[in-house]
C-alpha cells in the first residue's frame, strides 16, 4: 500500500520561507505526477504546484509562480515544495497527492492518493 507523508508546515511571518516534504512509501510505480494542493475553510482544494516523476515537468498556480518551487528526488521517492516570500493568502492546509497519467494536472479529482495534509499559516 502506498502512503504519502507530508512534513514541514508551520507558522511563519509574511515574507518568510517554508519547505514542505512529501515522502512516498510502498509501491509507487503507478504514480506519474505528484502535486501539492492547498485547501482553506469552505473552499475546494486548488493545485499549487505539480511535477512528473519521469522528466520533472512542472506546473504552477499563477498566484505562486516565481515564489514557490516544486522538486523531486526520485531516489528517495520524495517531493518538495520550497515556498519563499510567503503571503497571508498562502495560508491553508497543504496536501500532497499522486496521480497516474490520465486526468488533468490541475483537477483534484484526477488524483487517487492523498497525504494527511500539513498546516501552513502566514501571519501579516
Image (cartoon, grey):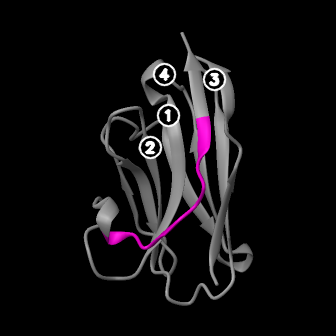
Q: In what element is the residue under mark 3? A: loop
Residue picked out by circle 2: 38
Residue picked out by circle 1: 92
Q: Nearer the viewer, residue 92 or 51?
A: 92
Circle 3 packing at 10 Å, graded few (<14), some (14-19), many (20+), is: some
| Residue 19 quadrant | top right
Instruction: Name the residue located 42 percent from the left edge and 34 percent from the top edge.
Output: 40
Disc 4 from disc 3: Cα separation: 8 Å
First of labels 3, 2 by sequence position: 3
Instruction: Name the residue located 60 percent from the left edge and 55 percent from the top edge.
Output: 116
- Which quarter shows the C terminus? top right
Q: Nearer the viewer, residue 41 or 72?
A: 41
- Which quarter shows the N terminus? bottom right
> On the picture, is 62 further left or further right than 89?
left
Is residue 18 visible in the rendered structure shown here? yes
| Residue 101 quadrant | bottom left
Is residue 105 visible in the rendered structure shown here? no
Q: Are marks 3 and 2 in contact (CB under 8 Å)?
A: no
Q: In what element is the residue under mark 4? A: loop
Circle 1 packing at 10 Å, graded few (<14), some (14-19), many (20+), is: many
Question: Magenta stretch containing residue 89, yes or no?
Answer: no
Q: Which label number is shown at residue 16? A: 3
Residue picked out by circle 4: 87
Instruction: Name the residue located 63 percent from the left edge and 88 percent from the top edge.
Output: 27
Q: In what element is the residue under mark 1? A: strand
First of labels 4, 1 by sequence position: 4
**Residue 33 location in percent, x, y?**
44, 73
Q: Which label number is shown at residue 102? A: none
Disc 3 from disc 2: Cα separation: 18 Å
First of labels 1, 2 by sequence position: 2
Bounds of the magenta segment: 110-119
Amino acid at each position: 500500500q502506498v502512503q504519502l507523508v507530508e512534513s514541514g508546515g508551520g507558522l511563519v511571518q509574511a515574507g518568510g520561507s517554508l519547505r514542505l516534504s512529501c515522502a512516498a512509501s510502498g509501491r509507487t510505480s503507478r504514480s506519474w505526477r505528484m502535486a501539492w494542493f492547498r485547501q482553506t475553510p469552505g473552499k475546494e482544494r486548488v493545485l499549487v504546484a505539480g511535477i512528473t516523476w519521469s522528466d520533472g515537468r512542472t506546473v504552477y498556480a499563477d498566484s505562486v509562480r516565481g515564489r514557490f518551487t516544486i522538486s523531486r528526488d526520485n531516489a528517495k521517492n520524495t517531493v518538495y515544495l520550497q515556498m519563499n516570500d510567503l503571503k497571508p493568502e498562502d495560508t491553508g492546509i497543504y496536501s500532497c497527492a499522486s496521480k497516474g497519467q490520465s486526468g488533468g494536472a490541475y483537477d483534484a479529482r484526477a488524483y487517487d492518493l492523498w497525504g494527511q495534509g500539513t498546516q501552513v499559516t502566514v501571519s501579516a
